Image (cartoon, rainbow, N blue to C red):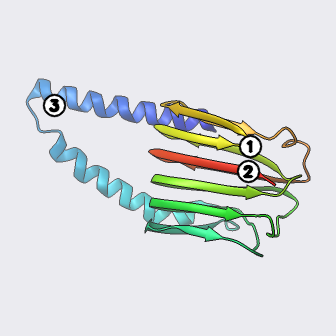
Amino acid sequence: MRDNWQIFIGALITLVGLMFLAGSLLDVDVGAFCWPIGLIALGAWLLLRPQLVGPDTAVQMSLLGDVHRHGVWEVTDEEIWIGVGDVELDMTSADIPVGETRLRVFGFVGEVSLLVPEGVGVSVSSLAFVTDARVLGRKRDNIFTPFHLASDNYETAERRFRLETHFFVADLRVKQV
């Protein structure tokens, strides 16, 4: 999965570069075509995205703002879309179902903070141009490379939580208590 996103982004950047090179060689203003087409494609994709995810996956969108969940709440498969903002989830009192639950967070710039009870398997991956991660006691800074880390008990845990983030700049904080 991580490799598919990396291939897609690499191909997209290469395609845009080739279009600008062709525009320079042919003396055509490629930007006059790229920006409107790109905005139309992005808008159509954002409108259609909620219908493309599974029926059991909740989708929450917010251009600016934060998502906070504390206390008693039910953890479900979910996608969160934020332009700029933070996602803060305290799962210590949450109802975490048996099996794997997946949260996908998409945004431009943001921090994702996750507090998970001991015994729950955790897998964290990030695809971003810049990732600053403090996950499960380990610190990593990645630039232009995907990040992935899983707890030692992830494969064998009865309850598993998979966090996938897709940002331009991501700040990840994950602790088990």
| Residue 88 image-quadrant placement | bottom right
Q: CA distance from mark 1 to mark 3?
A: 47 Å
Mark closer to the chain start, 2 or 1: 1
**Of the residues tagged 2 and 3, which is closer to the observer?**
2
Q: CA distance from mark 2 to mark 3?
A: 49 Å
Q: Which residue is mark 3?
A: 23
Q: Which residue is mark 1?
A: 136
Residue 124 on image: x %, y %:
68, 44
Q: Which SS class for mark 3?
A: helix
Residue lying at 76% horizontally and 39% vertically, measured from the top left: 150
Image quarter of the N terminus: top right
Q: Which residue is mark 2?
A: 175
Which residue is farthest top? Answer: 25
Residue kind at label 2, given as amino acid type: Lys
- Residue 78 is tagged as none
Depth check, front residue: 90 or 38: 90
Residue 130 on image: x %, y %:
48, 38
| Residue 31 image-quadrant placement | top left
Pointers 2 and 3 in contact (C-beta within 8 Å): no
Q: Is residue 33 left or right of residue 155?
A: left
Mark closer to the chain start, 2 or 3: 3
Residue kind at label 1, given as amino acid type: Leu
Which residue is farthest left? Answer: 27
Whether residue 94 is situated above or below residue 10 in the rendered picture? below
Residue lying at 53% horizontally and 39% vertically, measured from the top left: 131
Depth check, front residue: 6 or 48: 6
Image quarter of the C terminus: bottom right
